[in-house]
Image (spheres, rainbow, N blue to C red):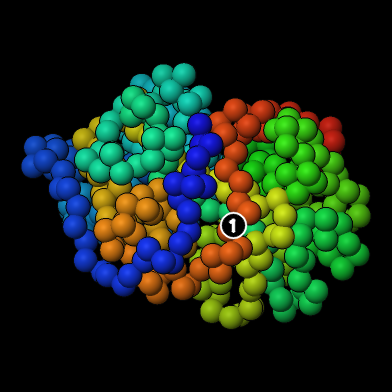
Amino acid sequence: MITKTKRLLSITTAMVVASTSFAFAEPSAELIAAAKKEGSLTTIALPHSWCGYGDIIAGFKAKYGIEVNELNPDASSGDEIEAIKANKGNTGPQAPDVIDVGLSFGPSSKAEKLIQPYKVSTWASIPDDAKDAEGYWYGDYYGVLSFIVNTDIVKKVPKDWKDLTGSDYANSVALAGDPRSSNQAVQGVYAAGIAAGETDATKAGEAGLKLFAEINKAGNFVPVIGKSASLAQGSTPIVIAWDYNGLSWRDTLKGNPPLEVVVPETGVVAGVYVQAISAFAPHPNAAKLWMEYIYSDEGQLGYLKGYCHPIRFNDLAKNNKIPKEMLDALPPAAAYEKAKFPTLDDQAAGKTAITTQWDKVVGANIQ
């Protein structure tokens, strides 16, 4: 359970010095050879603007000369799991080798025998409570839920969750996913419940639903999946998304329109995403080599460059591997001090409440 993650992944600039050298345990020559023989890796749900994945994928291809077949970049965590199930006997290009999903999907995928164990060479530096002891899944990065605001349109920037019910935000608020299937959206609703003061996970999920029902009743909720394009076009001028997505959109849009990434004053919920290899991976060695790459110093700093806090953050900092300018590009460290890391049990309870009651309580069919 991620009960100690806040301590383990504390954001502290005192530990950081500027260094750009990459030194990490290289995967074995046998694994590299086997992966190159397979020649390809199939990923799913990795948009290039998410956590620096564009550069990470390019770095992997350049380093090992292995092609990457990228399936459905905009898929949700639930879609990734369904893709594994649908392709159990398929060795073709539609079968994902690896997945990157919300924390709660790791244990459930293990229980359903959909993933296989593998421990990377940097295994010891991944916090114990952010990985499965047997190596079936392991955290790769985390972020916090934020309001991504188009300030060309929204002049009064919301500071906290309750603000979103106000008359200033008519037809403005969207989630970056469908809360019936998307981990990012589920956690957005859950965070709203935490802001309401609920500590019980099920009650927090229900409180979050109640707030979104108020947002919807006020005419403020837009029932579409919020993305950088809809944010820029003004059809969803406030999108609730992970901070790293908003920061990446800010860079991509280059001030046209200007965006503000707001970590809310209360209900700051951090989400750990996890990696795993499909139990039916057509390219199992390429999948293992991919894991070696993204858990290397180079891969982990690739996440930080993409505004995601890598799971090996403390280890990198301790060994003077993090360039200071990477942290300077993030919101102030103080914004993250109230972050709560829900346990696996909390996530499961909150997810159940939200996914099963969204239609009844909120009644917004997201397209």
Q: Is residue 201 visible?
A: yes
Q: Residue at x 72, y 55 (%)?
A: 266
Q: Residue at x 33, y 70 (%)?
A: 17
Indicate the position of residue 264 as horizontal and vertical percent values. 70, 60
Q: Is residue 52 visible?
A: no
Q: Which residue is mark 1?
A: 337
Picture quarter containing residue 23?
Answer: bottom left
Picture quarter containing residue 247?
Answer: bottom right
Q: Residue at x 81, y 39 (%)?
A: 207
Indicate the position of residue 283 as horizontal and vertical percent values. 25, 34
- Amino acid type shown at disc 1: Glu
Camera-side residue: 312 or 49? 312
Q: Is residue 280 left or right of residue 265?
A: left
Q: Can you name the residue that lies furthest to the top here?
A: 112
Indicate the position of residue 214 as horizontal and vertical percent values. 88, 48
Camera-side residue: 110 or 319? 319
Q: Secondary structure at mark 1?
A: loop
Q: Is residue 18 above or below residue 214?
A: below
The number of discs equals 1
Q: Is residue 160 left or right of residue 107?
A: right
Q: Is residue 312 above or below residue 77?
A: below
Picture quarter containing residue 202?
Answer: top right
Q: Is residue 153 above or below residue 39?
A: below
Q: Is residue 189 left or right of residue 40?
A: right
Indicate the position of residue 181 as horizontal and vertical percent values. 63, 37
